[in-house]
Amino acid sequence: MSKVGWRLISVGNCARAPSVRFELSSFALLTRNLKERSSESGTTTAAEEESMWVIDAGDNMMGRLMEESWCGLEGLRRLKGVFITHLHGDHVFGLPSLLSAVKRAGGKQKVTIIGPSGMRKWLNSALWVGAPDLGVRYRILELQYTPYRTRNWNFHPSESGYKIVPMSDDGKWDLSEYIGTDHFEVKAAPLRHGIPSLGFVFQKPGRKLVVLGDTCDSSAVESIGKDCDVLVHEATFTKPEAQIAQRAYHSTAEMAGNFAKKIGAKTLLLTHFSSRWLSDNNQETFDGVRPSLEDPVSGLTLRNVQNINPYHGLTVILNEAKEAFGSESLYAASRNLEIEL
């Protein structure tokens, strides 16, 4: 018997480059697995296992995790894996330092890195130059993207496994058998972006979480993301910039809202905001925080929900997405916003 608790925590919410006040879009998924074991004498004991999974790792991901009370340096010993949606720098440049921090924390675990074609080339090249003696074991699961060819790049001393995961006939990837956990499932699907980009679907009994990378077309995720409890979707542009969004292979807030409605998502969490929205010099972005609330639509508990200043430009994005989504269960990712699933 296994019972799992999930906490999805927003680590950052901006696109392209971090600023003094805002970090790059990324998330941590904390899982608590309570397993009951029976001994030979017939007695039953319960052991709780806590794990952390990171979704994208831009610049300063290590620093952000280390300064948070729910993680800190010691918390990196619980890092089981890193899901990289795509290889643009604002989603991956912090990965080498994050792995180095696991060694500083005294972590002995093997970390699984899941990413698109090119993941092994990028990571091993960076580590050969900057950390040839990394001292942390990792293995790479590279999701073979049909239009791209994967080469066999040099083996790094800390690499303890590498596997190319082919796309199945339905155009998806089922990762459950590869990530070393028996208490939740993970699937992935391709997104349309300038380079290979992925959407991940995490599922356990009674709960489904969908986290998408950069995208201008998320339709491939529809079949496996239907009726999810939470959809994390980028909202880099707004409706008047729709043509720019398409050329940049990004989404508008309206597109995010439409997709959330299409798949029947209960809650929509917007992220990957352009710096022009977050750096409104005339108004503070956030105006107070709600320590805890229960969403009236999804019934989920949220913590550290930042109130958006109604006079700030970010409200344009929220209102546009809300109108398309047709639901009030919509939030902007902000530092330490937490959703319990």
Image (cartoon, grey):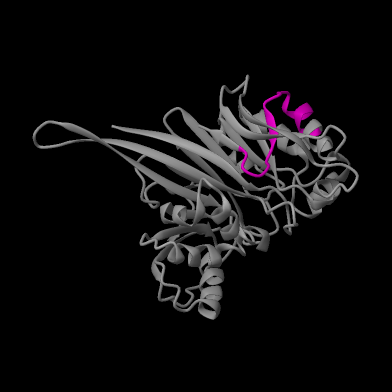
In-front residue for pair 79/298: 79
Magenta includes 322?
yes
Q: Residue at x 67, y 50 (%)?
A: 214
Q: Is residue 269 rendered to the left or right of residue 46?
A: right
| Residue farthest toward the top in the current orientation of the protein | 296
Q: Position of residue 141 (x, y in %)?
A: 45, 59
Q: Is residue 145 rendered to the left or right of residue 235?
A: left
In-front residue for pair 290/90: 290
- The number of numbered badges drawn on the structure is 0
Q: Position of residue 268 (x, y in %)?
A: 66, 33
What is the span of residues highlighted in magenta in the rendered image?
320-337
Q: Is residue 324 above or below residue 239?
A: above
| Residue farthest toward the right in the current orientation of the protein | 282
Q: Position of residue 29 (x, y in %)?
A: 51, 44
In-front residue for pair 131/166: 131
Q: Residue at x 77, y 47 (%)?
A: 236
Q: Residue at x 37, y 59 (%)?
A: 109
Magenta includes 185?
no
Q: Residue at x 74, y 43 (%)?
A: 235
In-front residue for pair 20/302: 20
- Picture quadrant of residue 155: bottom left
| Residue farthest toward the left in the current orientation of the protein | 41
Residue 184 seen in render: no
For the N terminus, the quadrant is top left
Q: Is residue 198 rendered to the left or right of residue 104?
A: right
